[in-house]
Image (cartoon, rainbow, N blue to C red):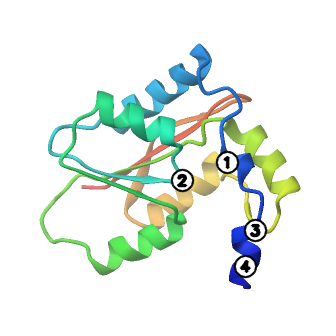
Amino acid sequence: MNFEELVEKDWSFLESDNPSSKEHDKKIDQIISAANIAENSKVLVSIGSEEFVDRLVDSSPCQLLLVVHESILSLACIKERHERHDKESARVVISPLQGRQALEQQRQKYPDIVVSDLPEKMKLEKVASEHSFWLKDFVDDSSLYLAVLELKE
């Protein structure tokens, strides 16, 4: 891929249209609550908005916060390579703030950037199970997609 093309792309679709709405704030709170973050938690945020990360920092003290832009496959590969032998609980929360419908519209408009849709519940359960996770919570309606995967003990 040509790096200049990547830099010159219009990335504005990743920005929230109305970040100060009460509905938007409620979704952020629901996502943070689903993550069940404690003071000794190590949190990884993948493709999080600045507002989401700010709210997370303000509301949920944690031991370590890492914000990245990677795919869940890359995260699973890293976990597999560096898995510790002690029993640590781990959760993966997948939740684009604008929901499935908005993400699908973005994929149609920017197919070279948004390369896939969010997984359906059965597919997510299958993939999670194959990687030592289980689907703890799942919401998929027109305005919210929230999937919480937890590491099997």
Marks 3 and 2 sit apart, C-alpha to C-alpha, by: 19 Å
**Mark 1 or mark 4, which is nearer the start of the sequence?**
4
Q: Label 1 crowding class (10 Å Cα cut-off): few <14, some 14-19, many 20+?
A: some
Number of numbered discs present? Answer: 4
Q: Which of marks 3 and 1 is in front?
A: 3
Q: Do the residues labelled 4 and 3 touch (CB within 8 Å)?
A: yes
Q: Which mark is residue 104?
A: none
User: Is residue 17 placed above or below 95 in the rendered structure?
Assistant: above
Marks 1 and 2 sit apart, C-alpha to C-alpha, by: 9 Å
Q: Name the residue under label 2.
A: 47
Residue 137 seen from this side: no
Q: What residue type is labelled 2?
A: Ile
Q: Label 3 crowding class (10 Å Cα cut-off): few <14, some 14-19, many 20+?
A: few
Marks 4 and 1 sit apart, C-alpha to C-alpha, by: 19 Å
Q: Nearer the viewer, mark 4 or mark 2?
A: 4
Residue 4: give x, y in percent of width and height. Answer: 72, 79
Q: Which amino acid does label 4 sit on?
A: Glu
Q: Residue 8 carries which label?
A: 3
Q: Residue 14 carries which label?
A: 1
Q: Are marks 1 and 2 in contact (CB under 8 Å)?
A: yes
Q: Name the residue under label 4.
A: 4
Say left or right for 131 vs 71: left
Say left or right for 2 vs 151: right
User: SS of the residue at dot 1?
Assistant: helix
Residue 69 seen from this side: yes
Residue at the bottom extreme? 1
Q: Residue at x 66, y 53 (%)?
A: 119
Residue 50: give x, y in percent of width and height. Answer: 49, 42
- The quadrant of the picture occupied by the C terminus is bottom left
User: SS of the residue at dot 4?
Assistant: helix
Residue 13: give x, y in percent of width and height. Answer: 74, 47
